[in-house]
């Protein structure tokens, strides 16, 4: 066989082997099963909130209501289940000066919202009435009373907005800019550069939940910008003031020149007053930072303390002290339990249930408790053997009270130690 014929024969054999292999693979090929999409089933309850309520521009005296100043409102369902149709109620209150025209009172229908979905609309509608100067408070309540939607959280349906309509002749004075450097030569003297002072300005201050509960921790968000030069101090203090309290927290960082910083603070509302409360923040409360303008370091926010009772095993400051006791076998061992009303109105009579390891539970009647007060319940238990017994305490176990929250009505933190 010639060399050329041998090469041609080898190529032919390889082609035949390749075709056989391809046919075998094709015969053994199986289609993959198509993935079946299973829709995710949401669990839990809906949670409606007024996510946003921002003016396009602050109303001014003489402006036609609904013409140039528009409030952009967004209602969000941030819960885990769809929310049925409900309504948003807008109530206007005039704190000082002007009066609230009837056009500023409104009931807005809200359609059904799936989990994570929102609805936006603008308000108020165009009117022939004019804005008058004064301080106004708007209360926006989604799923307004009586609420139709069963939510995972019912105390965050309101949002409060406070704004001021200024008079036409109101003059805002602007400071002249500070010259950073002066390099003019006068004779043989050269002036030293002049450093610009810092200027701290509050850009935004609001409280995440404007419907508060006595003893509840709530979050405030403060945004501060330094419109001036380099600050002479790296730290400053923030002071928070409510109707009955004033507190200065730990030092915080001062914004650098041109920088904007945000501060989140978890504070306590421990007043027993119902209704609206003015909340004030003061930036650089101890005047550590030298500024070119000290007149824009204060901001205010109106909050609402809900007029409800709140039966609780927690102290008014939000802490829990577990009831404990020690006693001997074959003797009645008492357990002292304190029940608090952390709301701002009196509770109605209810029931308490206490169950400890290896014993029949003990129940009792809780009388009406005034706002900010507590009542003491002392059941007793007997064991024939030594050991540490855990106890569960449940307040209003028949669920007869209307409260701000039921989350603090039960605990497993009670303990009785039985000795020889």
Image (tube, rainbow, N blue to C red):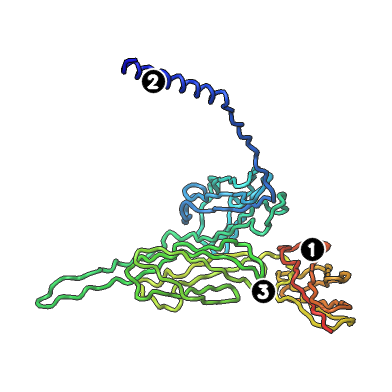
Q: Residues within 10 Å of mark 1 (few under 14, many from 20)?
A: some
| Dot in front, 1 or 2 | 2
* Residue 165 position in % (x across, y down): 49, 59
Q: Earlier in the sequence, mark 1 or mark 2?
A: 2
Furthest-front residue in this view: 1
* Residue 236 position in % (x across, y down): 43, 75
Distance of label 3 from label 2 (alpha carbons): 89 Å
Badge 3 element: loop
Direction from residue 204 to residue 325 in the image, left or right: right
* Residue 145 position in % (x across, y down): 71, 54
Q: Residues within 10 Å of mark 3 (few under 14, many from 20)?
A: few
The residue carrying mark 2 is: 10
Q: Is residue 330 above or below residue 352?
A: below
Which label sits on residue 401?
Answer: 1
Q: Is residue 327 above or below residue 308?
A: below
- The residue that appears at 41% across and 18% down in the rendered structure is 12
Residue 189 visible here? yes
Marks 3,2: beta carbons within 8 A: no
Distance of label 1 from label 2 (alpha carbons): 94 Å
Residue 382 visible here? no
Direction from residue 272 to residue 28 in the image, left or right: left
Distance of label 1 from label 3 (alpha carbons): 22 Å
Badge 1 element: loop
Q: Nearer the viewer, residue 398 or 389?
A: 389
Which label sits on residue 319?
Answer: 3
Q: Earlier in the sequence, mark 1 or mark 3?
A: 3
């Amino acid at each position: 066989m010639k060399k050329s014929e041998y090469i041609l024969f080898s190529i032919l054999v390889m082609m035949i082997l390749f075709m056989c292999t391809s046919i075998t693979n094709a015969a053994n090929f199986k289609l993959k099963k198509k993935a079946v999409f299973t829709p995710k089933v949401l669990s839990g309850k809906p949670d409606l909130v007024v996510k946003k309520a921002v003016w396009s521009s602050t109303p001014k005296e003489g402006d036609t209501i609904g013409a140039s100043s528009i409030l952009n409102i967004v209602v969000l369902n941030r819960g885990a289940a769809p929310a049925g149709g409900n309504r948003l109620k807008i109530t206007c209150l005039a704190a000082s000066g002007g009066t609230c025209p009837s056009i500023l009172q409104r009931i807005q229908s809200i359609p059904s919202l799936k989990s994570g979905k929102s609805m936006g609309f603008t308000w108020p509608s165009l009117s022939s009435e004019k804005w008058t100067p004064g301080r106004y408070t708007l209360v926006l309540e989604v799923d307004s009373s009586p609420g139709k939607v069963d939510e995972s959280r019912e105390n965050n349906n309101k949002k409060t907005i406070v704004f001021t309509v200024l008079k036409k002749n109101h003059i805002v004075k602007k400071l002249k800019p500070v010259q950073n450097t002066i390099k003019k030569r006068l004779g043989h003297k050269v002036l030293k550069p002049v450093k610009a002072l810092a200027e701290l300005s509050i850009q935004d201050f609001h409280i995440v939940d404007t419907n508060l509960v006595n003893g509840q921790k709530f979050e405030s968000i403060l945004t501060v910008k330094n419109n001036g030069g380099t600050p002479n101090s790296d730290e400053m203090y923030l002071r928070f003031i409510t109707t009955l309290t004033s507190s200065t927290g730990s030092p915080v960082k001062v914004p650098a020149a041109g920088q904007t910083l945000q501060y989140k603070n978890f504070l306590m509302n421990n007043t027993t007053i119902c209704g609206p409360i003015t909340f004030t923040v003061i930036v650089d409360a101890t005047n550590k930072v030298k500024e070119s303008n000290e007149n824009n370091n204060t901001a205010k926010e109106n909050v609402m303390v809900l007029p409800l009772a709140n039966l609780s095993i927690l102290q008014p400051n939000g802490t829990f002290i577990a009831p404990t006791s020690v006693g001997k076998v074959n003797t009645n061992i008492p357990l002292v339990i304190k029940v608090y009303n952390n709301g701002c109105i009196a509770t109605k009579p209810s029931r308490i249930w206490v169950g400890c390891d290896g014993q029949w539970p003990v129940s009792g009647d809780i009388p009406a408790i005034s706002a900010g007060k507590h009542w003491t319940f002392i059941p007793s238990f007997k064991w024939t053997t030594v050991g540490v017994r855990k106890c569960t305490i449940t307040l209003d176990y028949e669920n007869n009270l209307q409260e701000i929250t039921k989350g603090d009505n039960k605990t497993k933190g009670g303990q009785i130690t039985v000795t020889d």
